[in-house]
Image: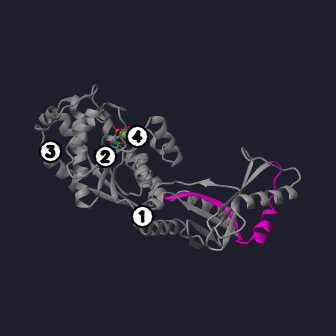
Amino acid sequence: MKVILLRFGELYLKGNNRQIFENTLITNIKKMLDGESFKFEKTFGRYVISNYNEQREKAIVEKLKKVFGLYSLSLADEVNAEQSAIIERVAEVKCDGTFKVFVKRADKNFQPGSMEFAKLLGEVVLKNNPKSSVDLYNPEMSIFVDIRLNGKAYIFDNVIKCQGGLPLGSSGHGLLLLSGGIDSPVAGYLMAKRGMTLDALHFHSYPYTSEQAKEKVITLAGKLCEYVGNIRLHIVSFTRVQEEIHKHCKPEYMITIMRRIMMRVAQELCKKYSMGAIITGESLGQVASQTMQSMTVTGSVVKDTPIFRPCIAMDKEDIMKIAKEIDTYQTSILPYEDCCTVFLPKNPVIKPTFEKAAGEERFLDVDELVCQCLQGEEIIDITK
Ligand code: ATP
Ligand code: MG
């Protein structure tokens, strides 16, 4: 019988929590395959998907490749865990080049032992494929026989890498600061990969930024949904904040103050909706607002919520690679302006200080500006 054999990664690290993690993972797998018909079986160390429509196999595999917590999968044949049944199936393997047989026994009662059985099965392949030969070090084809504790053995020649990470929903809920750029969708993806579900917060500066810029962010959130599940997108107008800063503060401190106000708004939303972390796409040294000093001064306005910056140590190239893999890149590079590019100063400060930032903020009614941002909050629920 044709099946898809699923392996999960770090779950074994979780001791007593293992059950909760596994249940979350299983729920997520079933949710991801919603609309497909299939049978799901859990056995020690593996999940098995069977009785699916073979014409949907490719689509099902693509869906499973998006489930965080799954480590790899194989398209396999399931037979009874008996020598004769396994030999019969291995005798059908077609191989014209070099190969190696790998036997793994979760069921240690199965006899013969792994090495001996691999050798025996190798002889079966050789006998049925005159052009084949064994290469133990660099085989062209790997034939795996995985004997499990459910009385079944799985035979396959492929191992397809999946996302890894932890099941979505097992690491709390965070607020992603989502711009229209390349980095922040990747930051959201990376946190979700560690099991965190997400809301997103976008600041726009209409009419300085266009309606298309907002649409772009909605599209990006939609693409993230494929991996992250449903996302509640909070859209907040930043126009008045920017006008006020532009009017009253030194141009070189404009971005620092903007970011501090963004952080305060994010913190308030976290409190209001019980979210446990703020996430940004910042990367050390990428631009003036992402130097260590800049991030210290902007981060310092947030007191009770951690700020996670999963891209902090990544090169732009590496961030772009992930953006392409998760299909956000092409949308991110559309040329609509972000609110950060409105009134952009020529020489933003690279090493801002707490004192000077606070000094500039004295020219503003910061609390009132934050309050206004929150009052104008628009909510869009983005679903898959
Ligand atoms: P990105 O590619 O994510 O836009 P960036 O390299 O352009 O990042 P900045 O514009 O300095 O960098 O923004 C740094 C981070 O601040 C972003 O990754 C994002 O988390 C947040 N951010 C910037 N602009 C906005 C916005 N308009 N709305 C929400 N968050 C924003
Ligand atoms: Mg940006």
Circle 4 residue:
336
Depth check, mark 1 against mark 4: the one in front is 1
What residue do we see at 51% from left, 54% from top? 164
Kindly check if marks 2 and 4 are in contact, taking CB atoms under 8 A apart as contact: no
> Residue 247 versus residue 83: which sits nearer the camera?
83
Mark 2 or mark 4, earlier in chain? 2
SS at badge 1: helix
Depth check, mark 3 against mark 2: the one in front is 3
Circle 3 residue:
366
Q: Residues within 10 Å of mark 3 (few under 14, many from 20)?
A: some
Looking at the picture, which amino acid does disc 2 mark? Answer: His
* CA distance separating discs 1 and 4: 48 Å
User: Picture coordinates of residue 367 (x, y %)?
Assistant: 14, 48
Q: Relative to 23, does residue 371 appear above or below in the rendering?
A: above
Mark 4 or mark 3, earlier in chain? 4
* CA distance separating discs 1 and 3: 47 Å
Circle 1 residue:
15
SS at badge 3: helix
Identity of the residue furthest to the top in this view: 347
Identity of the residue furthest to the right in this view: 130
Looking at the picture, which amino acid does disc 3 mark? Answer: Val
Looking at the picture, which amino acid does disc 4 mark? Answer: Tyr
Depth check, mark 4 against mark 3: the one in front is 3
Q: Residues within 10 Å of mark 2 (few under 14, many from 20)?
A: many
> Residue 14 versus residue 322: which sits nearer the camera?
14
Which colouring convention does the figure follow?
one colour
Residue 79 within the segment the image draws in magenta:
yes
* CA distance separating discs 4 and 3: 28 Å
Looking at the picture, which amino acid does disc 1 mark? Answer: Gly
Q: Which mark is residue 370?
A: none
User: Picture coordinates of residue 360 (x, y %)?
Assistant: 14, 34
